[in-house]
Amino acid sequence: MDILSWFPALTTTGLFAAAVWFAREAISARLARSVQHEFDGKLEGVRSEFRASEERLKAQLREREAEITALRSGALSALASRQAALDKRRLEAVDQLWAAFNSLAPAKGIAASMSVVKFEAAAKEAERNPKARQLFEVIGAGFDQSKIDQSSADKARPFVSPMAWAVYAAYRAVTLHSVMRWHVLKGGLGAKDFTDREAIEKLVVAALPHYQEYIKQHGSDVYYNVLEGLEARLLSELQAMLSSSEFDKAGLELAAEIIRQANALQTATNEAEHAD
């Protein structure tokens, strides 16, 4: 068989091989395009989700920054307003307590008169002698206990320092102790002391510790002698309140704590932003 007889077979085989190769290339190209299209779609979805997540994060950061600003300005502003209101009320309380103290001046006058009287001996005499009772009534002529302003002091109590109140309470107790004794004498009620001398002594010693031994030795007969010391101590306490050093320190510490927390929140926000 010569070569011409093989030519059709070779041609057919070659054409078939070429067709198979082109078909394979076409399928490969189509598969590649399909895969690429699917990959591009998924990649775009990831990008879109990432952009949305980024926008949400930015919105959260902006919201947190707004909260920080509100914390700084709002909290400090509220603190300043509250402090101003407290300062105003504290000034009013000082006026109220001092007015109540001044209303005790007539009672102090009674205390001055009673300081030179031996109470037990005078009480026995007043009980049996009307003239003695008249004498003690004259000593307190014009005294009106209803004019002693105790309500103002009670209203001021929550806004004054504990020591200022303690000193005022001791001063009031001492003067009213003398007034009570005066009532006993002018009424001829006998040697009765209707006040709690032990409680008064504790008040005085708490306000003026250096008087403890003096009062222990001489008892209630020397209560009047501590009034000047109590008045000086009360003035000192009220002046300390007006300077507001203790309250200002507390306010500054609170403001510093607010700023510290705001700064911590700002730092956390910055770190979150940089991490993105």
Image (spheres, helix red, strand yellow):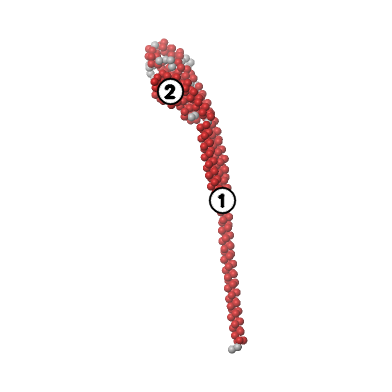
Q: Residue furthest right?
A: 4
x and y percent of residue 39 in the render? 57, 63
Q: How far is disc 2 from disc 1 in space, using C-alphas? A: 67 Å
- Which residue: 55% across, 52% down? 275
Q: Which residue is mark 2?
A: 211
x and y percent of residue 133 in the render? 42, 13
Q: Secondary structure at mark 2?
A: helix
Identified by mark 2, the residue type is Tyr
- Is residue 83 at all visible to an observer of this figure? yes
x and y percent of residue 191 in the render? 38, 17
Q: Secondary structure at mark 1?
A: helix
Pick whichever of labels 2 and 1 is earlier in the sequence: 2
Q: Callout 1: few (<14), some (14-19), or many (20+) C-alpha neighbours within 10 Å? A: few
Q: Number of marks in the image?
A: 2
- Which residue: 45% across, 15% down? 113
Which disc, if any, is residue 274? 1
